[in-house]
Image (cartoon, rainbow, N blue to C red):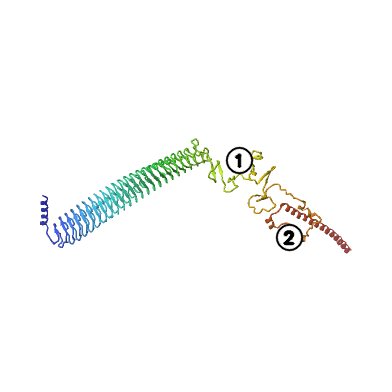
Amino acid sequence: MKKQLFWIFLFFIFIAGRVYSQTNYVATAPASVTPGSDNTLVGVGAGNLNMTGASNLFIGRGTGTLNVAGTQNAFLGTSAGNKNSSGQNNAFIGFSAGTSNTTGNNNTFIGSGSGYTNSVGYNNVFTGYRSGYFNSTGNNNAFYGTGAGYSNTQGGDNTFVGSDAGGGNTIGLSNVFVGSLSGVANTEGIENTFVGAQTGLSNTTGSYNTFLGTLSGKSNTVGLNNIFLGHSAGFSNTSGNQNVFVGIQTGRNNTTGIANIFLGFAAGYTNTTGASNTFIGNGAGYQNSEGGSNTFIGANAGTSNTTGNGDIFIGALAGGNNSTGSSNLFLGFAAGYNNNGSANVFLGNGSGNTNSTGSNNIFVGGNAGLRNNDGLRNVFVGDGTGQYNANGNRNVFIGAGAGSPSTAPNLINAVAIGTDAQVTASNALILGNNVNVGIGNTAPNAKLELTSSTSGLSGLRLTNLTNTVSTTLVNQTKFLTVNAQGDVVLGSTTGSGARLAVEDDGLWKTANNNIQNTNEGGVIIGSGIQQTPAGYRLYVSEGILTEKVKVAVKTTGDWSDKVFGSAYKLRSLNQVEKYVKANQHLPGIPSAEQVVREGIDVGKMDAKLLEKVEELTLYMIQLKKDNELLRKKTKMMEKQINVLQRHNIN
C-alpha cells in the first residue's frame, strides 16, 4: 500500500510541474523567467520570486518566497525562510522558521517559529518552538528548547538549552544557559554560565556568573563574577559580586554580600550582606548574616556567627556558638566553641571551649583554657593548661597541666612554667613542679644552680643591694658564704664550723679583729687603675670618702721643721722669681705632668706644702725687719726736714 502511495505522489509531482530549465525540478513554477539552477521548489509560492539563487531546497507553502540570490538554503515548512533574499547556507525547518531572514547566513532554525524575526543574524542554531523568536541581528547563538532565547534580538555567542532558557535575553553576549527557565530573565548580562532548572532565573544584567545546579543563583539580578554550584546555591543572591558557593544551599540567603567563598552543604546559608568570607564544610558559617572577612573551615565551624568579623575558625565545631566575637583564631575540634570574645587565639581540640567574652587570650594545646569564661590577656601553652582559670587576667601558664587549681580560678598576673606547675597566688611566678632550675648549665643539682661564664663571678646580681647601701642589721656574727662546690651556705664568726668568706680563697687571713691579705701584692679597689707603683699596698679608683685620715711619718727628717734651722739655705725672692718663670711651679714641688704620671705622696706633699708655708714665714719676718728699718729712717728724715724748714723761715 505504501509503495502505491509513493508512486502516486511522484506521479502527481510530475504532472503538476512545468520545466523551465533543464536542471530544475519544479513542483511550483517560479515567477522569474530566468530562474537559478539546481533548486528544488515544492509548495504553493515556494521560491516564487527566485531569480538567480541556486542549489536551494524550498518545501512548503510560502517557503523562500522572496528569495532572489540566496543559495544553498534548505527551507522546510510553511513560510519557512519566507523573506530570505540573499541569505546563504541556511536551514529553516518548521512553520514560520526564519520567516524574516533576509541576508542572514549559516543559520539553522528547527521548530515552529524558531528564528522568526531573524533578519541578518548569522551562524545561529535555534531548535525548539519559537526558540530565538525575536533574534534579528544576533550572531553565533545556539538556542535549544521551547522558547529558548525567545526575546534575543542582538545578543551573540549565546548558548541556551532548555525550555525558555534565556527566554528574556535581548542583547546579552556569550552566555550559556542550560536547563528549563535558566537565565529566563537575562536581558543584557554577558558571559554567564547557568546549568540547571531555573538557574539564574532572575538574572537581568549580571555578568560573568557561573551557576550550576537547580535553582542556583535563582534571584540574581545584577550580581557579577559569581560561581554557584549546587542545588539552591546562592538562591537569594541579587547584586552580590565575586562570590563562590559550592554545595547544596550554600549561601542560600546571600543578597548583596561580595567576595565570599562558601563550600559545603548549607555553608553560609544565612549570609545576606557579609563580605569577604570563606566558609568550607557542611554548615560552616550557617547563621552568618553580616559578618565579614571570616574564614571558617570544618563541619559547623562558626555555624552561629552572625556579625563577627575577621575570625578564623578551623576544625569541626570550631567557634560553633560564636556570634559577635571578632578577630579570633580558633584551630581544632570545638576550639572556642562558646566564644563571643574578640582577638583570641585558641589552638588545639577543645581549647577555649567555654570562653564567652574573654578577649586577647592565647590558648595552645588540647583543652587549654577549657573553663576560661571572661578572663583577658592570658597565655596558656600546653595540653590542659589553665583548665580551671575562669575569670583570671594576664596569666601565663606554659607546660602540660600548668595553671592554677580549682580553688584559685581568678588569679591575676600569675605565671606557672613547667609540666603540672601550679600557682595559687596573684603576681607570683612558679617554675616547675618539684624540679631543679639551672641557669648556664644543663644538669642542675640544686633547686637553683647558676653557672657563670667568668671564673670567680657567681652570675648573681642584686641591683638594689650594693655596697653603697646602709646595712639593715649590724653587729651580726652570721653571714652567707659558699663552700667548695659553690653552694651558698650560712657562715659564722663564732666558731660554728663554717669558714670565713675572706679565708676561702687563701689570699686573706684574720689577724685579731682585722682582715689581712697574705700575698705579696697590693689590694686594688675599683676598675680603671693602670699603674700600681711599688711601695704601695692599696690602690683605689674614684677616690676615698672618709671623715678622718691620719698619715704617719716615720722620722722627724720627713717633716719640714728643718726650714727654721740655722743650716737651712733659704733662696732669695729673686732666685724664686727666676725659678718660677723658668719652670712654672715652686722649687721642690712636682710639676703637673709629674703628678699625673706618678701621683703624689700625701704625707710628703703635706710636708712640702708646710715647707713652703714656713719659707713664706721667713720671708715675711725678713720683710718686717726691712719695714721697721725703713720706718726709722723715714722718721729721721722727717725731723731733719722740719729743722731745715724752721731755719729757712727765721
- Amino acid type at circle 1 is Val
Numbered label attached to residue 79? none
Q: Quadrant of residue 302?
A: top left
Q: Nearer the viewer, residue 307 or 338?
A: 338
Numbered label attached to residue 580? 2
Residue extending furthest right? 650
Disc with the residue nearer the chain's start (1 vs 2): 1
* Residue under numbered circle 1: 489
Relative image position of residue 222 (x, y in whole percent)? 33, 50
Q: Quadrant of residue 438?
A: top right
Up/down of 569 relative to 464, above or below: below
Q: Are marks 1 and 2 in contact (CB under 8 Å)?
A: no
Instruction: Mark yes or no: residue 614 visible.
Output: yes
Relative image position of residue 580 (x, y in whole percent)? 73, 60
Q: Nearer the viewer, residue 121 or 568?
A: 568
Is disc 2 placed on a helix, strand or loop? helix
